[in-house]
Image: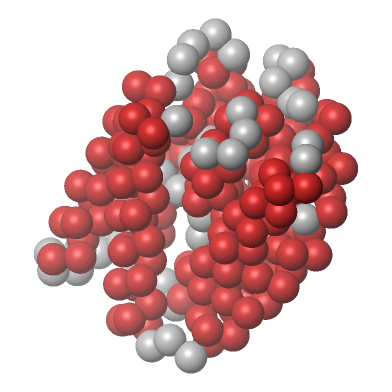
Amino acid sequence: MDTYTVMMILLAYLFASFLKGVTGLGFSTICLPLLSYIIDPKIGITLILLPSISSNLIVMFQVGHFIETCKRFWRVYLFVLPGLMLGVFTLSRANSDTIRLALGLVLVLYSSWALIAKEHLISKRTERLISYPVGFATGLVNGFTGSQIMPILPYMLSLKLHKDIFVQAVNISFTLSSFTLIILLRKYDLLAVGYLGTSIGGIVVVFAGVFLGGKVRKILPEKRYKQIVLAFLFLIGLSLIIKPFVT
């Protein structure tokens, strides 16, 4: 890649990692559409994996509560794995533009509704019952579209978690998914190994972006934080909808 392309990739890393630090969400989900404007999306998937994992690990270290979160949500994480396997298998044999469009519409509709509607919480019993399909569906959507946030994000938002627990819960899912994706993409010959060096070089940029974003997150009140997460979700959905028309 030429110098200009590398610089644009690093800028995409910085922007996505800063938002990751603020919200705890979406490095790969926001970075992949940005990279798709610069390079082949299939190469973009490879370029986001290592920075995504590093940004997840940094945020997980920042917020703590790791053991507590794993004990509560292990069912979700367990069922992410078979969902990922089916999602990547489908991706290897299909065009994902339609699914990305559908996902974008779901994100826009959900975030719009959640921003204007009253808060809806689910009970402990319901939380446990739906944890299995939520985990499986999250893995399926991630494997097929590259987005790691549906339906795990609305599920976590409905539990009235402290923002640090919320951030840790979704980042454990993101990290598990990213490591699994490396194996599955390699299996189906979808991993552009020759570009991993560029992604390794971007980890320093990602660290700086997440660090700065984490400082901003610490001063946000709980209510404002949730509004920012939902607004961010809306923008991601919108980007997925318009992406086929501009790439």
In the depicted structure, whether residue 86 falls above or below residue 239: above
Which residue of the protein is positioned furthest toward the top in this rendering?
93
The answer to which of 54 and 34 lies nearer the viewer is 34
Is residue 37 something one can see in this rendering? yes
Which residue of the protein is positioned furthest toward the bottom in this rendering?
219
**Residue 141: % across, % down:** 46, 32
The answer to which of 60 and 131 lies nearer the viewer is 60
Q: Residue at x 50, y 51 (%)?
A: 30
Q: Which residue is drawn at 30% across and 55% down?
A: 234
**Residue 39: % across, % down:** 62, 34
The answer to which of 149 and 80 lies nearer the viewer is 149
Left or right of 24: which side holds 2? right
Quarter of the image with the N terminus is: top right
Q: Residue at x 74, y 16 (%)?
A: 189
**Figure quadrant of residue 158:** bottom left
In the depicted structure, whether residue 189 falls above or below residue 23: above
How many numbered discs, if any? Answer: 0
Is residue 167 something one can see in this rendering? no
**Figure quadrant of residue 245:** top left
**Residue 92: % across, % down:** 59, 13
Left or right of 126: which side holds 190? right
Left or right of 26: which side holds 10? right
Quarter of the image with the C terminus is: top left
**Figure quadrant of residue 132:** top left
**Residue 224: % across, % down:** 33, 81
Colour mapping: secondary structure
Q: Which residue is drawn at 49% across and 11% down?
A: 94
